[in-house]
Image: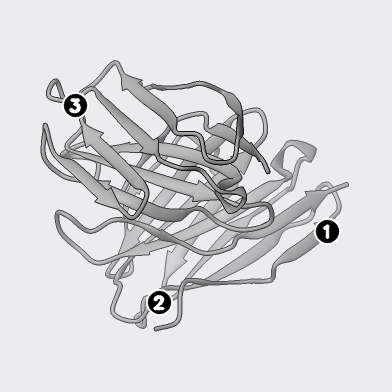
Amino acid sequence: GQQLNQSPQSMFIQEGEDVSMNCTSSSIFNTWLWYKQDPGEGPVLLIALYKAGELTSNGRLTAQFGITRKDSFLNISASIPSDVGIYFCAGQGETSGSRLTFGEGTQLTVNP
Amino acid sequence: KAGVTQTPRYLIKTRGQQVTLSCSPISGHRSVSWYQQTPGQGLQFLFEYFSETQRNKGNFPGRFSGRQFSNSRSEMNVSTLELGDSALYLCASSLVGRNSPLHFGNGTRLTVT
């Protein structure tokens, strides 16, 4: 089945630093989504990407849909303590309906 | 606009029992999906419902079932609970069609003892 490899698994950074994480897939996706999950809560949608090559920003967050349609990255600029959490990428295939395949997650820790 | 609402938030059950979890989607969203989240397996797709019909199903045993009502609200049921069913069960809703991302609720934390 489809698998997503997300890296890194964890990151420890200082406040103010930039962060980059990425996902690669063995299969092509038509949609890439990035979510953030805080403890005890469900994943919250950060950015949705629908077109190969698309680059989309949401405040300090920027994500890109890879040209091969098999990868995506998420950048966070000037990190702040509330960026702490687990970030997930998710891919959606053309025939999978609303079914998402999730990466393993990146645990981000920001030291003030 | 209210988000996806899941009840209950926490549940403790004993092996062999069954459980029903409830999900109310965002108003206007007609597609509802369920996911299981565990530390070992991550987020795994259970099933998707649209117009009261199961549209897609993940690789889970038949003990896991669901349904959707005419108002788009959904329930999932797990029968003959096993210890390994302990997990966070997440419901997500979306509009129908392309470019309609999933929005998740805060989940039901199920503990099986």
How packed is label 2: few (under 14 Cα within 10 Å), some, or many (20 or more)?
few
In which quarter of the view is residue A108 placed? top right
Badge 3 density bin: few <14, some 14–19, many ≥20, Cα 10 Å: many
In the foreground, A49 or B59: A49
At mark 2, the secondary structure is loop
Specify the subunit that label 2 lies on. Answer: B
Residue in view at x 66 percent, y 28 percent: B40
Q: Which mark is residue B12?
A: 1
Q: Are marks 3 and 2 on the same chain?
A: no
Q: Is residue B69 left or right of residue B82?
A: left
* Observer-nearest of B56 and B5: B5
Q: Is residue A100 left or right of residue B20?
A: left
**Which tag is nearer the camera, tag 3 or tag 2?**
3
Q: Amino acid at mark 1?
A: Ile
Q: List the single residue furthest toward the top.
A: A26
In the picture, the quarter occupied by the N terminus of chain A is: top left
Instruction: Give coordinates of residue A82: x percent, y percent.
Output: 59, 53
Q: Which residue is mark 2?
A: B69
Q: Amino acid at mark 3?
A: Gly
Residue at 81 percent of width and 48 percent of height: B112
Dot 2 or dot 1, earlier in sequence:
1
Q: Quadrant of residue B6?
A: bottom right
Hey, what amino acid is under mark 2? Phe
Which residue has dot 3 on it? A66
Classed neighbour count for the residue bearing mark 1: other residues with Cα under 10 Å, few (<14), some (14–19), many (≥20): few
Residue visible at 46% across and 42% down in the picture: A78
Vertical order, A104 against B93 (above or below): above
Give the CA distance from mark 1 to mark 3. 43 Å
The reply to whether residue A2 is visible in this rendering is no
